[in-house]
């Protein structure tokens, strides 16, 4: 099972230069406190960032299980934020990536 053991965590250069660190930390918080031990997790997780009425929404999507969970935050949404992010677990090394970075793996 993926995301059971964490050795190290990273954000890719693309993620680190396109999102404030607070928003990156929020992804790790969602993973640790709302997804782990709640839903089965594959080695690649998909998130979409969207504007909401009160700020922004992180949407977790699991196509295989036909599941979507939305997490609303009062962060200021920027239309230049990436639309889609991935968190990859590679034997405990976890990395947040942009779509084009994921395709390079």
Image: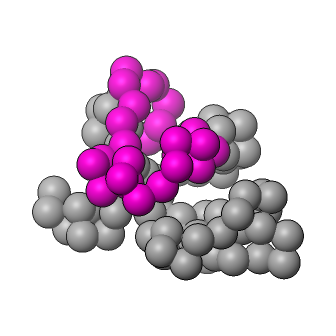
Residue 89 horizontal/vertical position (percent): 36, 42
Q: Is residue 14 magenta?
A: yes
In this rendering, does residue 66 appear at all? yes
What segment carries the magenta color?
1-27
- The quadrant of the picture occupied by the N terminus is top left
Residue 82 horizontal/vertical position (percent): 45, 70
Return the residue nearer the eye: 62 or 95: 95
Which residue: 30% across, 56% down?
14
Return the residue nearer the eye: 85 or 46: 85
The residue most toward the left is: 104
Q: Is residue 11 magenta?
A: yes
Which residue: 36% across, 53% down?
17
78 in relation to 104, above or below: below
Which residue: 48% across, 74% down?
80
Return the residue nearer the eye: 67 or 100: 100
Please give left or right for residue 79 compared with residue 99 in the image: right
The residue most toward the top is: 7
82 in relation to 22, above or below: below
């Amino acid at each position: 099972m993926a995301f059971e053991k964490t050795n190290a965590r990273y954000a890719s250069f693309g993620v680190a230069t396109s999102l404030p660190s607070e928003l990156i930390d929020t992804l790790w918080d969602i993973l640790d406190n709302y997804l782990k031990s709640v839903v089965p997790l594959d080695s690649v997780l998909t998130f979409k960032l969207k504007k909401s009425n009160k700020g922004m929404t992180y949407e977790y999507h699991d196509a295989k299980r036909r599941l979507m969970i939305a997490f609303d935050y009062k962060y200021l949404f920027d239309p230049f934020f990436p639309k889609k992010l991935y968190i990859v677990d590679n034997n405990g090394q976890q990395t947040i990536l942009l779509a084009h970075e994921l395709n390079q793996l």
